[in-house]
Image (cartoon, rainbow, N blue to C red):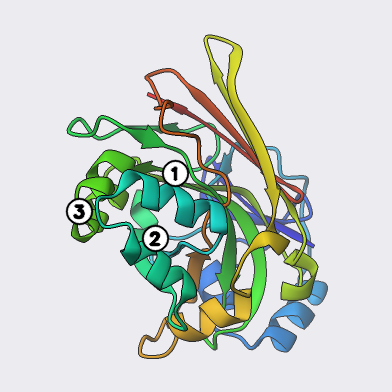
Amino acid sequence: MKLTRHATPNGPRWALDQHYLPTDFSLDQWLKLDLKTALEQLKTLPLAESAVDAILAPIEDCHEVWASGVTYLRSRDAREAESSVADVYQRVYEAERPELFFKANGTRVLGSEAGMRLRKDSSWDVPEPELTLIINSSGEIVGYTAGNDLSSRSIEGENPLYLPQAKCFDGCCSLGTSIEIVSAAEMADLAVELNILRDGSAVFSDKTLTSNMKRSFPELVSFLFRELTFPCGVVLMTGTGIVPDETFTLQQGDQMNIRIGNVELTNSIS
């Protein structure tokens, strides 16, 4: 099953498998249900006409997006290369406790085709394609979407304590296009692909698998929920295994194409 959110003339509306759900369906209320009840509800809701309106980010204003860092070996190596305190990243990669940080609230999240932006005070910027978990208020994993954790490597590399500034700014986060409702086990070996175009030509391309992650999805979720409650549910980016080398930085007009499993996400730098 697949959930999408659309910009209709009467406001945002959710669809299931490309057919509109009742107008009163909301993700935050659905994520308050336990997983079994939520899945049963979707099977009984009446479906309306085909969903043809523009697709929005699959998230609502009340939701928070959190993110995980240094969950892939490639990410650890890249962080060590950019930082003057490289052992910090080695320690967190090997530690029991993962790196978790706040990324964006729902009002700041962009959908596919929306323009992302670079910080004016950053000189080295990269997209970070990440399988992104959709989690209900009880901490159960409901499904996934694709995420772009756009980041300033120059700011984080200067000092790890600058991480919030490297990660949180207007236009820094995109999600979409759909929520794929599957179990955590079905996400364990998904392909993650990133292609970047500049003036219509490819300037970077790479891919990995979620099975290359050091940490499991339930592990990340368990740490996020240790001392935090999310009454509306929460969205969690699970880290990136694709990082361009030190010679690459994004430029105005670059197009970033991300594919994770069955979900595609496309954004340009505007």
Which label sits in the foreground, 3 or 1?
3
Left or right: residue 134 versus residue 153 is right
Q: Residues within 10 Å of mark 2 (few under 14, many from 20)?
A: few
Q: Is residue 161 above or below residue 182?
A: above
Which label sits in the foreground, 2 or 1?
1
Q: Residues within 10 Å of mark 1 (few under 14, many from 20)?
A: many
The residue nearer to you, when weighing 135 against 185, is 185
At 19% from the left and 60% from the top, the residue drawn is 161
- The amino acid type, in three-letter code, at marker 3 is Asn
| Cα–Cα span, label 3 and label 1 | 27 Å
The residue nearer to you, when weighing 241 against 144, is 241
Q: Return the x and y of residue 133 as percentages of the image width and height.
A: 59, 66
- The amino acid type, in three-letter code, at marker 2 is Asp
**Is tag 2's residue or tag 1's residue first in the polypeptide sequence?**
2
> Mark 1 sits on what residue?
110
> Mark 3 sits on what residue?
159
**Is tag 3's residue or tag 2's residue first in the polypeptide sequence?**
2
At 47% from the left and 83% from the top, the residue drawn is 96
Q: Return the x and y of residue 204 as percentages of the image width and height.
A: 58, 26
Left or right: residue 143 versus residue 92 is right
The residue nearer to you, when weighing 231 against 12, is 231
User: For residue 61, which numbered disc appears in the image?
Assistant: 2
Left or right: residue 256 versus residue 87 is right
Quick one: quadrant of the C terminus? top left
Q: Return the x and y of residue 163 as percentages of the image width and height.
A: 26, 56
The residue nearer to you, when weighing 154 against 57, is 154
Whether residue 102 appears in this view of the structure is no
